[in-house]
Amino acid sequence: MSTSDRNRPRTLAEALRTWDDAALGRLLQQRPDLAMPIPADTSQLAARATTNASAARAINRLDEFGVDLLEALSALPEPVSLADLAAGADQPVDVVQPRVAELIDLALVWGTEDDLRLIRAVHELLGPTPAGLGPITTRHFGDLDQLIEDAGPEAREVLDKLTWGPPTGSVEKAERPVTIASARTPVERLLARGLVVPRDPNTVVLPRQIGLHLRGGRVLAATRPTPPPLDGKKVTASIVDHAAAGAALDLVRQVDRALEQLGIEPPPVLRTGGIGVRELRNLAGKIGADEPTTAAVLEIAYAAGLVAAVEVGTNEMWLPTSAYDDWLDLDLAHRWAQLVTAWFGGMRAIGLIGRRDSSGATAAARERLINALAPDLERLLAPEVRLLTLRALGEAPAGVAPAAQAVVTWVAWHRPRRGGQFRDELVEWASTEAALLGLTGLGAMARHARPLLTQEPTVDELAEAISPLVPEPVSEILLQADLTAVAPGPLVRAVQDELSAMADVESHGGAAVYRFSESSVRRAFDLGRTADQLHQWLAAHSRTPVPQPLTYLVDDVARRHGVLRLGTASTYLRCDDESVLTHLLSSSLPGVQFRRLAPTVVVSPSPPDIVLNRLREAGLAPLAETFDGVVHVSTAAARRGEPPRRRTSRDFADSTIELTTDQVKAVIEKVRAGDRLAADRPSDETPEPAAPAETIAVLTDAAESHTRTWISYVDHNGTASERVVEPTRVADGWLTAYDPTTNQPSTYALHRISTARPVD
């Protein structure tokens, strides 16, 4: 055996032991699941890295070319050199080499450039037919070209169909053993020569050696070491920014209108969670948007914590939260930024709304429509695809709005093993939602959305990015003779609230249009405004004179408003003897008030049962009756407890773990200490527990000679551990020793030390 062979690592664990701290740090940063919990040593780290679950997480984050290289390594016979791998991928060595280094950094591949090896888990995850190649056969073929030529052209056509996979084909069951002399069909001629082998009586498979030979040494038909191009239409950056900013302001208005409407007419929470289709359609009509947009608006507001399911009596309703009031106090830029950050970090797949629940456990559940705000919209893949979609839009050439299919293909190249068709749908939904949020305009990414690509921006950073494109709020309107008012920009909140109380929004945009009508002016009077207040407010906030038709409209509605009066009363008393009611009004019953409406009728705001008890306590003999005058006989009311609050949302554990620099350093220190301990462990794998006197003698000698000692220790919880210490004192049933891993002295109970061995 040569020196190079002796120095070559034989396992992944041996390879990891040769890595420096920087390389181990990169591994832990890219595969943080390996650090939870902290591995005891490099052997345990390697064992954890080769589990199928951990390897699958690492492979799922690879791009298409990385997966192609893994498939090529899995298909080629070991040992695989870098040159062989480059030939199998049909790419230059200088293109393959840095990508192989990345795979080695991920501990999916180990070895040297002359002997690259996959970990076992990768072979299992890629399956028995990597790159569409069949299993390896032990048969020796000799001159394959001559063997294939002897089988005939028809047999070659069969081989061509199996070459690029799948490597299996169906055949009729043979009634007799096949030899070269007795073979009559093309498949029989291939079977006789071993060019295909039977898998079962009706299936043949192309051996891997034959497949690689027919492919000319290539493992894959084609590989793409770089992402596909993001081609599309030409756009102007300034127009993109302004179009996106306009969409951003529209979203803020839609969220405001939707939640304001929810506060007025809160819809009930469905038994299965979410908001009903009818209620969503009604809300869409009220805010002037289609149903998909309204659903997305509600979902974005829900992600931002602006709307929630609230118990109202015995029912549960969708209502704005207190955070909505705080949100209204922010300026437009910060309101938009808060919505964007909530959407960007959310896990809800909004595009699923209105679809059938294919993940349902029963047939009936699979037929159920998924509603907006439903608890079953969370998908772990959603935030990852959302980020990749924005990255695709951000990496498009300057002045280009990439085509939708180009974005889908770009994301698929970066995550080929994640999601499949659902991943592609998530890309389309993310693009639509980005346009609604004002992150894109005309299909291209706006400049104020780029902070999302570089880091996790704060609300202030996003607000600062869009602020130059947000117009300053105005406090004046333009009144017109056709009973409309034009807002020449976003209105100051107080002005908007007052105008919305007396006029209906007719159109949105940079200049919103409000229309006055009898019903809208009556609404203002219902809210407590007077005609004089409306006239004064309109004159103070209009750049143009108040039109005469609007003045007449306000005065005309004011004359007819309040002719009928309506009030509330919980209880009425009627009596043909007016003197009884007069005496009752002059008396003072505790906790009860009365008001006379007619000589024989009085009313009270107190509930009937309280009034009835107070009258009986006063010595009167009242009789209760129903609304239609029928005598009411009451029984003892059955008491009921409050119904338990029903959960309307689910929590998904975040699968992404990020380690800090200090955490990585701590893990590496623990692993290195474990390696030192393993190196100092006695040569016998499982030392037998020694007699207490022998153990004490070994420790006493070590303390006198200052010798490092390996001990097996059981703590008070019964957990056994091993460590190497430097004994300094043995007395009174305790060992005092210096522990190199903690850089400080420690004490150990002698009766808990089962074995002690000096370390050479």
Image (cartoon, helix red, strand yellow):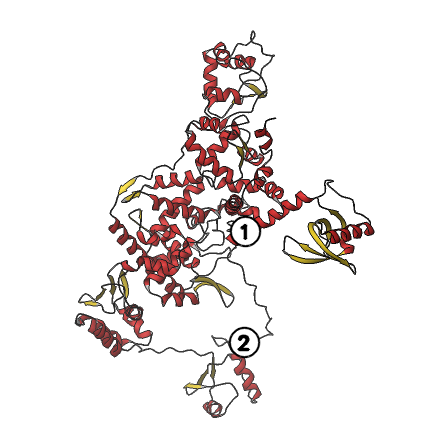
Q: Which residue is mark 2?
A: 632
- Residue occupying the point 57% across, 48% down: 668
Left/right of residue 453 with respect to residue 670 in the rendered view: left
Q: How many numbered marks, from 0 up?
A: 2
- Name the amino acid type tagged 2: His
Q: Position of residue 750 (x, y in %)?
A: 77, 56
Q: Position of residue 420 (x, y in %)?
A: 45, 39
Q: Position of residue 508 (x, y in %)?
A: 27, 59
Circle nearer the viewer, 2 or 1:
1
Q: Which residue is mark 1?
A: 665
Q: Is residue 571 above or below residue 312?
A: below
Q: On the image, which quarter does residue 739 sit in?
A: bottom right
Residue 290 appears in the rendering:
no
Q: The residue tagged with tag 2: helix, strand or loop?
A: loop
Left/right of residue 88 with respect to residue 698 in the rendered view: left
- Name the amino acid type tagged 1: Lys
Q: Position of residue 667 (x, y in %)?
A: 57, 50
Q: The residue tagged with tag 1: helix, strand or loop?
A: helix
